[in-house]
Amino acid sequence: MPTQETVPASVADVNASTSPAKFRWIQVIELGYEENEGGNDAEEAPICFNCGAAAGEHSKLSKCAKCEVASYCSRECQVKNWKGGDGKVGHKFSCAAYKRVGEDMMIIFGDDKDTARQDIISRLRFYALPYAIHKFSSAGRGFLFLQSDSSLAVLSLPSPVLSNGRKYTRQRSVLLHWLTMKEFDTEVCMDDFELASVRKELNAVVESYHEEIEVPVLMRFRCGHVAVGVAPLIPDFKLCTMLGKEYYAETSGAVQLNIDDM
């Protein structure tokens, strides 16, 4: 699997200067699975996001006034965590994400879910989109199928820290496939009637997209959230082609990306 260290410096420069990709979402469905996900750690009492201290008999934790989620044992810890460092993502970069997921680790509003999906693809685009273009060159028109054993809420957070400040103990990863509609019909729909419900919209996207400027995407998460959309190619087709050959020349099937290695 490619790692961040394999990205050429020129690509890193583009990544830093390019605004997040915007998507056209064609269909979004909820399959009704339980979304509050994070294992036993999610049910434990909150701890300080910076030092890990829990509330004591004579002390209590205060919350960030902006997201009303992140907890701190002192002003000093809050200031330090806001800036980040020592391997931690600064809260100034993740405050909005925690506001979306709330204390219950559930994204409620549709616009917030759109933003969460966009944030995920933005983090993965220098690996996921080159994979899609590389597979398109050999398999033909199809779509990028992104699946995760994490919920949309958990995967959308910039770091693997739950709303109670405790670390998410599972590996946050996504599995990428490039599927043609024929493969979708014979390999997916035959066994998964729930995904078959998006076939009409997905097929319309696959038949009409412009392969040099966009990629059809089907996303599915542990929580039962499913979305069909179109992702613009950022980076562009030429760079995606180059990176696809570099990363995936020896890859014939699906690819797993560990999101915290990005």
Image (cartoon, rainbow, N blue to C red):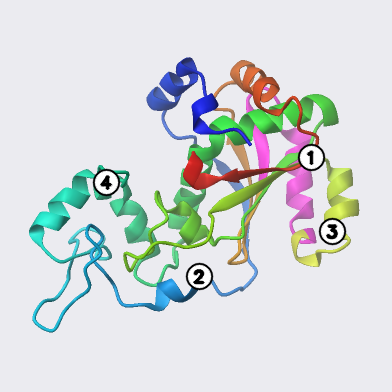
Q: Find numbered disc 1 in the image and state the secondary structure of the residue it sits on.
A: loop
User: Where are the magenta residues, as a range?
Assistant: 196-217
Q: CA distance from mark 4 to mark 3?
A: 42 Å
Q: Are marks 4 and 2 in contact (CB under 8 Å)?
A: no
Mark 1 lies on residue: 253
Q: Find numbered disc 4 in the image and state the secondary structure of the residue it sits on.
A: loop
In the rendered image, residue 94, in percent from the top left (x then y), is placed at 32, 50
First in residue order: circle 3 vs circle 1: 3
Q: Find numbered disc 3 in the image and state the secondary structure of the residue it sits on.
A: helix
- Alpha-carbon neighbours of circle 3 within 10 Å: few (<14), some, or many (≥20)? some
Left or right of 61: which side holds 238? right
First in residue order: circle 3 vs circle 2: 2
Task: Identify which amino acid the numbered label 4 is placed on.
Answer: Gly
Q: CA distance from mark 3 to mark 2?
A: 26 Å
Nearer the observer: mark 3 or 2; the answer is 2
The answer to whether residue 162 is above or below residue 243 is: below
- Alpha-carbon neighbours of circle 1 within 10 Å: few (<14), some, or many (≥20)? few
First in residue order: circle 4 vs circle 2: 2
Q: Are marks 3 and 1 in contact (CB under 8 Å)?
A: no
Mark 3 lies on residue: 189
Q: Residue at x 29, y 53 (%)?
A: 95
Magenta segment includes 203: yes
Q: CA distance from mark 4 to mark 2?
A: 23 Å
The answer to whether residue 175 is above or below residue 64 is: above
Mark 2 lies on residue: 37
Mark 4 lies on residue: 90
Q: CA distance from mark 1 to mark 2?
A: 29 Å
First in residue order: circle 4 vs circle 3: 4
Left or right of 122: which side holds 45? left
